C-alpha cells in the first residue's frame, strides 16, 4: 500500500501554490516496466532498490518456490514412507588417500556409526589407507559400531559417478559378511 501511495506521489508530483508541481527530494524516482506495468521504487537508505516479486510479498533476492510441472502429481505411498521403512543409509567415500563410511538416519540426518582410515586407531594398524584390505577393515569396524547402536539393516544407493565394484563393493560386502543387512539399489 505504501509503495502504491509513494509511486502515485512520485509520478504525479505534489502541487504547491496554484499548480507548480515538485517531487519530494528524499526519494529518487525509478521507473521501469515490470510485467507490462510501470513501476516506481524509492531508493533505499543503502542505495539498493527494493524490488518486489510478482505477488509483492518478498524482495527479489528470495528464491521462488519451484513449481511442479504437473501440479496434480501424486506422491506414492512408497515415496512417503521409504524414509521410515528403511531409515538408515550407508554412505561410502573413497579417495586416493583414505576410505570412510558412515550409517546415517534418514529422518533425523544423524550419523549413527562412522568409520574411516583417517582415524588414529585404524591408521596405525593398516599398511595402506586406501587399498582393498583397508576397505574390508572399514566394513568390519563399521558393522561393529552399527551393532552397538542397534542398527542391523541399511540401504545403499551408489552416487551417479560411482560404479558398484572394487573398493565400494568390498566395503558393502564386508558389512554384509559381518551381520549388517544392506539393500543395494542400482538404477
Image: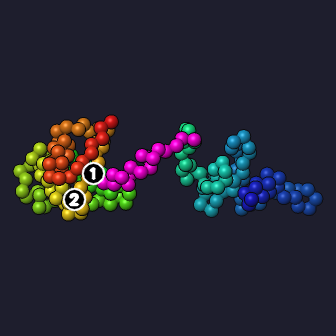
Residue 112, horizontal then vertical, whole percent: 27, 60
Mark 1 and mark 2: Cα distance apart in space: 10 Å
- Location of mark 1 (residue): 154
Q: Is residue 23 above or below residue 54?
A: below
Residue 78 image point, x, y percent: 42, 46
The answer to whether the residues at label 1 and label 2 have Cβ atoms under 8 Å apart is yes
Residue at image point 33% right, 54% down: 87
Instruction: Tell me where residue 106 appears, x and y as whole percent.
Output: 35, 55
For the residue pair 33 and 77, the one nearer the viewer reads as: 77
When asked about the image quadrant of residue 142, the answer is: bottom left
- Marks 1 and 2, the one that precedes in the sequence: 2
Tell me where the magenta segment starts and ends, as one range.
72-88
Q: Quadrant of residue 187?
A: top left
Report which residue position mark 2 lands on. Answer: 146
x and y, in percent, of residue 68 in the image? 54, 42
Determine whether the residue tagged by mark 1 lies in a helix, strand or loop: strand
- Along the line of sight, the residue nearer the viewer: 4 or 168: 168
Taking depth in this image into account, of 67 and 139 the one nearest to the observer is 139
Residue 124 visible within the image: yes
Amino acid at each position: 500500500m505504501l509503495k502504491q501511495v509513494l509511486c502515485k506521489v512520485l509520478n504525479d508530483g505534489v502541487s504547491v501554490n496554484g499548480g507548480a508541481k515538485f517531487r519530494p527530494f528524499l526519494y529518487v524516482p525509478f521507473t521501469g516496466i515490470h510485467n507490462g506495468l510501470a513501476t516506481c521504487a524509492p531508493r533505499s537508505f543503502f542505495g539498493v532498490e527494493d524490488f518486489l516479486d510478482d505477488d509483492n510479498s518478498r524482495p527479489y533476492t528470495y528464491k521462488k518456490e519451484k513449481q511442479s510441472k504437473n501440479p496434480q502429481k501424486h506422491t506414492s505411498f512408497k515415496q512417503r514412507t521409504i524414509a521410515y521403512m528403511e531409515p538408515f543409509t550407508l554412505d561410502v567415500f573413497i579417495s586416493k588417500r583414505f576410505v570412510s563410511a558412515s550409517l546415517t538416519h534418514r529422518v533425523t540426518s544423524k550419523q549413527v556409526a562412522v568409520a574411516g582410515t583417517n582415524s588414529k586407531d585404524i591408521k596405525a594398524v593398516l599398511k595402506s589407507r586406501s587399498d582393498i584390505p583397508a576397505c574390508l577393515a572399514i566394513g568390519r569396524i563399521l558393522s561393529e559400531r552399527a551393532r552397538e547402536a542397534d542398527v542391523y539393516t541399511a540401504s545403499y544407493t551408489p552416487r551417479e559417478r560411482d560404479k558398484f565394484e572394487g573398493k565400494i563393493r568390498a566395503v558393502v560386502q564386508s558389512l554384509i559378511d559381518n551381520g549388517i543387512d544392506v539393500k543395494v539399489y542400482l538404477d
